[in-house]
Image (tube, grey):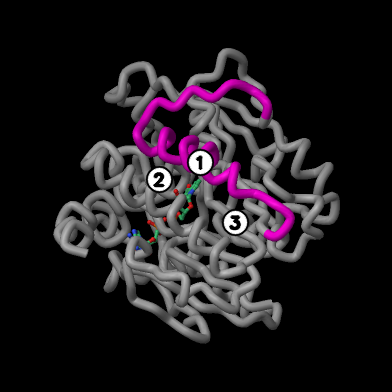
């Protein structure tokens, strides 16, 4: 197959390009390269690479592809709060525009990188795709509005799929440490302290970033009728954790580190457990490669090997919000 991947130089995208290429697919990548210089390891390059804002894509760019994997986004809640208008323009308006371009260009499938954060603070804990959505941030709102506005484009020749991904963790050549698991591991390694900013009680569904990339491959290869115009939670039922469980697991890896509940965020309203039965039902052959313990051990080994230290933890390189605040003009001017 010939796939078009946006955001291919990101945390998840870097795995996706490597997986697609090793499965023998042809890959075009499109990324504005906002995190240039932030690499943690060597990155596999796609067959064709466009350094371009997704808002400037044309029908011509997408012609000849079988599927678009749309990952480019301002990729977390605090970044969305930094400039909500920019978040909506990139995450919602451009995502809808890319879907329309893909359809006009005759691309059969559009795989959207959505998020379980659309459930926000659920009325109940175990949330399924049919449950009510309760976005708490501009980021989550942008994901819901994209699903809503892309869905009417679905027809016999165009199949959008909305991957509602759990929160990612783990090693990637484009590492981020602004995600809860990676952050707790990073703080334990650099300060011998596992700093939990809430009281540790909130639930989160977690997934290794490479397993999200594997889900994209599975969705691209799945029969059309199985995934056509579906929202699908991406993760595993046994991979819902309370933040304090994550802290305890980090402590088992680094027994000298102490757990500190700083409570600085007050009561964390983002509290949700998610069910992944639909994914298991639709794609029974798709299994996660990682559980949290295995993924954490792998990242820990990588961090030790690379000498991860306080400068890495406090610096801009692996924290999207810090890097992006210095580079907003690149997005604003684009
Ligand atoms: N990481 C997670 O926990 C998680 C969870 C659920 C969903 N997602 C979604 O998955 C996708 C990828 O997340 P990630 O963690 O890899 O993020 P990331 O920030 O590491 O990567 C995003 C990539 O998109 C690029 N990009 C941003 N704006 C662009 C634009 N206007 N034009 C072209 N390129 C642009 C950036 O340069 C970057 O390489 C995002 O849509 C994110 O919302 C991530």
Work out whether residue 120 or residue 91 is closer to the camera in this orientation and state it.
91
Between disc 1 and disc 2, whose residue precedes?
2
Q: Which residue is mark 1?
A: 149
Above or below — where is 260 with respect to 97? above
Quadrant housing residue 66:
bottom right
Q: Give the x, y percent position of residue 107.
A: 61, 67
Cα gap from disc 1 to disc 2, whole angstroms: 9 Å
> Nearer the viewer's eye, disc 3 or disc 1?
1
> Against 321, is 25 above or below?
below
Q: Residue at x 57, y 68 (%)?
A: 16
Apparent side of residue 294 relative to residue 209 in the rendered image (left or right): right
Image quarter hosting the N terminus: bottom right
Q: Which residues are magenta?
A: 130-157
Q: Position of residue 131 (x, y in %)?
A: 64, 23
> Which residue position holds label 2?
92
Question: What SS does tag 1 mark?
Answer: helix
Q: Residue at x 41, y 39 (%)?
A: 142
Q: Of label 3 and label 2, which has the lower sequence position?
A: 2
User: Cβ–Cβ below 8 Å for labels 3 and 2?
Assistant: no
Residue displayed at 66% across by 31% down:
129
């Amino acid at each position: 197959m010939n796939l078009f991947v946006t955001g291919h130089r990101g945390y998840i995208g870097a795995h996706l390009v490597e997986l697609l290429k090793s499965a023998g697919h042809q890959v075009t990548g499109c990324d504005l390269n906002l995190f240039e210089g932030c690499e943690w390891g060597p990155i596999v390059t796609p067959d064709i690479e466009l350094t371009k804002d997704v808002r400037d894509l044309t029908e011509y760019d997408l012609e000849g592809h079988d599927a678009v994997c749309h990952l480019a986004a301002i990729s977390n809640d605090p970044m969305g709060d930094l400039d909500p208008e920019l978040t909506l323009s990139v995450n919602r308006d451009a995502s809808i525009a890319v879907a329309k371009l893909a359809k006009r260009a005759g691309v059969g499938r559009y795989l959207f990188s959505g998020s379980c954060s659309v459930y926000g603070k659920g009325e109940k804990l175990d949330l399924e795709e049919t449950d009510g959505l309760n976005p708490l941030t501009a980021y989550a709102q942008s994901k819901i509005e994209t699903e809503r506005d892309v869905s009417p484009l679905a027809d016999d020749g165009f199949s959008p799929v909305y991957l509602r991904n759990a929160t990612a963790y783990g090693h990637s050549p484009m590492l981020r440490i602004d995600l809860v698991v990676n952050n707790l591991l990073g703080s334990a390694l650099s300060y011998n302290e596992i700093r939990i900013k809430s009281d540790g009680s909130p639930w989160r569904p977690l997934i290794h970033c490479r397993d999200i990339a594997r889900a994209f491959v599975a969705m691209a290869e799945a029969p059309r009728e199985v995934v056509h115009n579906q929202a699908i939670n991406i993760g595993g039922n046994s991979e819902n954790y309370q933040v304090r469980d994550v802290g305890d697991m980090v402590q088992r890896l680094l027994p000298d580190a102490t757990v500190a509940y700083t409570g600085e965020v007050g009561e964390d309203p983002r509290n949700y457990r998610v069910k992944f039965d639909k994914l298991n039902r639709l794609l029974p052959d798709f299994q996660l490669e990682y559980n949290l313990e295995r993924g954490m051990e792998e990242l820990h080994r990588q961090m030790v090997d690379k000498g991860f230290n306080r400068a890495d933890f406090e610096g801009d390189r692996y924290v999207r919000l810090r890097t992006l605040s210095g580079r907003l003009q690149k997005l604003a001017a684009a």
